[in-house]
């Protein structure tokens, strides 16, 4: 359970219920509409499962919600009673009612463990949103790194802040994006996860509240859980429109989190792109609340639509540099095997991060840093990025076409960038579909891995990491898994069939 109890007012809950599709909340029964109380209960249950109303959120009193919805109090009372019976609501006399998830629900929260190499021939792995290395640029970058290595080989090799040349190259890239940056504002880390871990150690100690988008990146959520953070989920807005600023302002005001973690550019997993005005407003709200905003930009360069102009970076709206810390990485744009990430922040924050790093990993491998420096300084990064974008665009289109063909009941919005498709699984359990699918030879992460307290049971995430033939096979197997779940026959799934690339 989350350790901070939010509340949902009657007007807010009425707005959320009104934003749902009619078919989500009113189900035909013998040619007639469901009773009003049943429709209301189904609507609230769906909001909880989709994470738009957090688990452990206090719901409005029956009389208040009845007035907001223009229904009788009897209708609301019957809906609440139905939700209690299903395990989605808990109540205590004198304390009110708050949302819950049923005991025993399949609620995985950790990210998928890496697929063993020996399983690669029999399982299509859609668990990891990372692509193979773009050649010949990886080989050229490593050759360039080896040529630059000799002077560094005569040193101790520990650079807690990162190689000066790479810090300068990353700073120059921010400056070129319209955000003037000095190398003193950059620290090189071992991947973006290393960057987030360093920030959490310094800025958000055990027991501190950290606001996170709901859904959010599974690995970072797990990192924060293990660091002892008290996660406060904030629901995303609908239809890839970015953040729900009303919800963010409420959480920043009421929960007063020490830190907030957001992905503004091609959000993982939904693919949402936050508009520029939302970025400005969220920075202002965070500054007013005294909350440090950590902006993850690992997907920012994976633009998949021609002519799409990205909004300015989140840090562009923090000229003083005291409200926003930015995290970047080479993993998604280039290759996850080069474990290079970075932090952009005010110089004093960077100095504190560097000092704290002495008790963690001391520094990032020199050869990897030299390879990324070579890419950034020779134009190889942008050339490789062009290859990466084209490959990802083709993969995205193949995955979307295959899912539409084999799983017509699944719902999603095609993202304009990034590496992931967030698909709603037609009212079935995403966890059970993922379990059945792995037995059939395709591996996908289910929605609860990206949520807090069991939300998003009706979703799976599909990465753009496979091309047309493999995407077709994956969708076929997912369709078979879906049919098994719908029929209740998941126990009869066969062992995985051999997959030939």
Image (spheres, grey):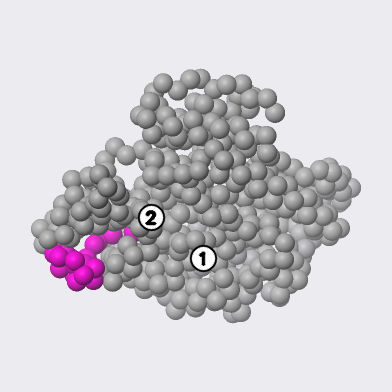
Rendered residue at 64%/57% (across/down): 417
Work out whether 294 lies above or below 373.
below
- Name the image quarter holding residue 398: top right
Residues packed near mark 1 inside 10 Å, few (<14), some (14 to 19) or many (20 plus): some
Residue 482 placement, left or right of 391? left
Q: Which badge, 2 or 1, comes first in the chain's sequence?
A: 2
Residue named by callout 2: 51
SS at badge 2? loop
Residue 183 placement, left or right of 91? right
- Name the image quarter holding residue 181: bottom right
User: Of residues 144 and 451, which is closer to you in this image?
Assistant: 451
The answer to whether one can see residue 120 in this image is yes
User: Of residues 57 and 345, which is closer to you in this image?
Assistant: 57
Rendered residue at 15%/55% (across/down): 78
Q: Residue furthest front?
A: 31
Q: How many marks?
A: 2
Closer to the eye: label 2 or 1: 1
Report if residue 223 lies within the magenta region: no
Rendered residue at 60%/24% (across/down): 122
Magenta stretch in the rendered image: 53-73
- Name the image quarter holding residue 170: bottom right
Rendered residue at 24%/62% (across/down): 59
Rendered location of residue 449, percent (x, y): 45, 45
Rendered location of residue 290, percent (x, y): 44, 74
Rendered location of residue 402, percent (x, y): 60, 40
> Residue 7 has which mark?
none
Rendered location of residue 81, percent (x, y): 16, 52
User: Of residues 378 and 168, which is closer to you in this image?
Assistant: 378
Residue named by callout 1: 241
């Amino acid at each position: 359970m989350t350790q901070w109890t939010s509340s949902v007012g009657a007007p807010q809950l009425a707005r959320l219920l009104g934003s749902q599709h009619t078919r989500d909340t009113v189900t035909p029964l013998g040619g007639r509409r469901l009773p009003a109380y049943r429709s209301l209960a189904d609507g609230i249950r769906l909001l909880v499962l989709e994470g738009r109303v957090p688990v452990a959120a206090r719901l409005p009193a029956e009389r208040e919600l009845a007035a907001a919805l223009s229904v009788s109090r009897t209708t609301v009372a019957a809906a609440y009673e139905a939700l209690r019976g299903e395990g989605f609501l808990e109540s205590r006399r004198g304390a009110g009612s708050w949302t819950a998830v049923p005991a025993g629900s399949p609620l995985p929260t950790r990210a998928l463990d890496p697929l063993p190499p020996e399983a690669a021939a029999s399982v299509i792995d859609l668990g990891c949103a990372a692509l193979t290395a773009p050649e010949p640029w990886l080989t050229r970058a490593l050759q360039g790194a080896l040529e630059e290595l000799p002077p560094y080989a005569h040193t101790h090799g520990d650079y807690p802040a990162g190689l000066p040349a790479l810090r300068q190259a990353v700073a120059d890239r921010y400056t070129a994006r319209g955000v003037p940056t000095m190398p003193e504002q950059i620290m090189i880390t071992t991947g973006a996860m290393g960057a987030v871990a360093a920030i959490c150690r310094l800025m958000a100690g055990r027991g501190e509240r950290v606001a996170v988008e709901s859904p959010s990146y599974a690995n970072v959520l797990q990192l924060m859980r293990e660091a002892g953070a008290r996660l406060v989920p904030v629901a995303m807005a609908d239809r890839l429109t970015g953040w729900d600023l009303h919800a963010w302002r409420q959480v920043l005001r009421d929960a007063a989190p020490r830190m907030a973690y957001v992905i503004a550019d091609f959000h993982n997993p939904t693919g949402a792109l936050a508009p520029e005005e939302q970025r400005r407003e969220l920075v202002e709200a965070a500054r007013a609340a005294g909350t440090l905003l950590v902006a993850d930009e690992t997907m920012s360069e994976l633009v998949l639509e021609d002519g799409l102009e990205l909004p300015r970076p989140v840090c562009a709206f923090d000229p003083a540099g005291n409200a926003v810390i930015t995290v970047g990485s080479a993993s998604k744009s280039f290759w996850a095997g080069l474990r290079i990430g970075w932090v952009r922040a005010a110089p004093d924050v960077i100095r504190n991060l560097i000092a704290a790093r002495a008790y963690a990993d001391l520094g990032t491998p020199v050869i990897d840093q030299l390879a990324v420096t070579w890419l950034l300084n020779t134009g190889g990064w942008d050339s490789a990025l062009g290859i990466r974008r084209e490959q990802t665009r083709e993969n995205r289109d193949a995955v979307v076409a295959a899912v539409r063909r084999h799983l017509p009941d699944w719902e999603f919005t095609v993202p304009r960038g990034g590496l992931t498709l967030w698909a709603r699984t037609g009212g079935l359990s995403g966890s059970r579909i993922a379990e059945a699918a792995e037995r059939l030879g395709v591996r996908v992460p289910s929605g609860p891995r990206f949520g807090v307290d069991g939300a998003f049971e009706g979703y799976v995430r599909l990465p753009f990491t496979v091309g047309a033939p493999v995407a077709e096979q994956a969708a076929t197997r997912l369709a078979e898994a879906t049919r098994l779940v719908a029929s209740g026959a998941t126990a009869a799934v066969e062992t995985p069939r051999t997959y030939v690339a």
